[in-house]
Image: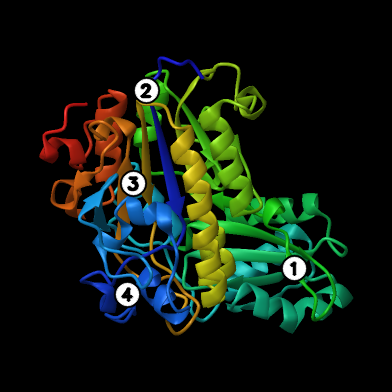
Amino acid sequence: MKEDLRRAIVLVIDGCGIGASPDAEAFGDSKTCNTLANTASHVGGLKLPVMEKLGLGNITAIDGVKQLDECYARFGKLEETSNGKDTQTGHWEMMGIVSEKAFPLYPEGFPKEIIDAFIKETGCKGILGNKPASGTTILEELGEEHRKTGYPIVYTSGDSVFQIATNIETTDLPTLYRWCEIARKILDGPHRVGRIIARPFKGTPGNYSRLGGERRDYAVPPPKKTFLDHLLGGNVGVYGVGKIEDIFVKNGLSHAKHTGTNKEGLELTLNAINGSDNLRAYKLGENKPDDVQMIFTNLVDTDSLYGHRRDVKGYGSALVEIDAYLDKIVKAMRKDDLLIISSDHGNDPTAPGTDHTREFVPMIAYSPTFLEGGKPMSAKKANVGIRHGFVDIAATLSDWLAVKWDGDGVSIFEESGVHV
């Protein structure tokens, strides 16, 4: 990346809420859901020294994370305005699109006409499951029957998803991906689910493991241009790390790289910041910009491995891992870099069930340029308050990268009087 380019890094800790939204009960969630605070409480406190210095403990009370009088970053929380609590609506809203209509859900499984069409058009001869389920539980329940019959395991969740799980020793990856592409065409119109997800796994009963690196999401494309498209239209390169390219169906991206773990995503992000990776290897077309000014990273483990599985200890450990990498990321940033840390929804591992939770999400914005003489700001000055809409992220990026954005949202700089 060119040294004179101002850059932005958006780090999404998937499923990392910070307290129930005012409308949480309308989405089936308790007023007590709070992914970060409840996780910290249940594990006896969290040690997150970097996020603590950036102001995390000032957003809400979190055991082990101090509330400080001075912070190194601007902080607050975002209230989702879209009708949903899923990955797509959350990420889309961050990039300027508010979804007023929710994607369809299937708490009783998919209707017969959908399953019949899937069996006929894929030639798979039959399916197993067809119900809401935990991804790991359903493998233990149906994994062996899948091996015997060859039938794919089809299931959903509290999200608008049609998930297809197959053992790579029974069904090869190209076949699984082809079945997902067929399902994507079938699930349209009133049954236009947000995502078809390929869920390959391996192993034997009692020892199954999902292959995160080979997971693929076949998402509905955004209904209109996002802020990412405006960046790309202005010849500003955008690098999607993790499942970002699936969520936006590659729209608005110049570079992309799938990941299998949070560690891989954090390493790729760090390498992009310090220039140690050849990003050309991840370029999505010769007509796209070579240089990258925005890195957009999704860290999915907090959601898929720990939130949905209600693994509180694992969730806490994932946050500690992220915090350790943040120390390296902050140190690698240039003076004119901006780091935004946020999330797409909640997924409180202490809540009943296995679904996402409707919560506020954290908003932390750090740049070395915020600090006078390297000294932190007063917490009062650093607090950007409650932001009504994830779209404030797009507005903030618009200010920072000097790319005009005529969508909704208010930049955190607009109200703080900070010159950017």
Residue under label 3, please give it. Answer: 94
- State which quadrant residue 401 falls in: top left
Q: Position of residue 86 (x, y in %)?
A: 42, 61
Identified at 37% across, 19% down, the residue is 234
Q: Position of residue 37 (x, y in %)?
A: 35, 72
Counting residues from the start of the chain, the first of labels 2 and 3 encountered is 2
Q: CA distance from mark 2 to mark 3?
A: 20 Å
Identified at 71% across, 66% down, the residue is 165
Identified at 24% across, 37% down, the residue is 395
Judge the density around disc 4: few (<14), some (14-19), many (≥20) Cα neighbours within 10 Å: some
Residue 6 disc label: 2
Residue 27 disc label: 4
For the C terminus, give its image quadrant.
Answer: top left
Q: Is residue 96 visible?
A: no
Q: Is residue 59 visible?
A: yes
Judge the density around disc 2: few (<14), some (14-19), many (≥20) Cα neighbours within 10 Å: some
State which mark lies toward you, 4 or 2.
2
Q: Nearer the viewer, residue 297 or 40?
A: 40
Residue 127 disc label: none
Residue 209 disc label: 1
Q: Does the CB distance between marks 1 and 4 fall below 8 Å?
A: no
Q: Considering the numbered disc 4 on the image, is that residue within a helix, a strand or a loop?
A: helix
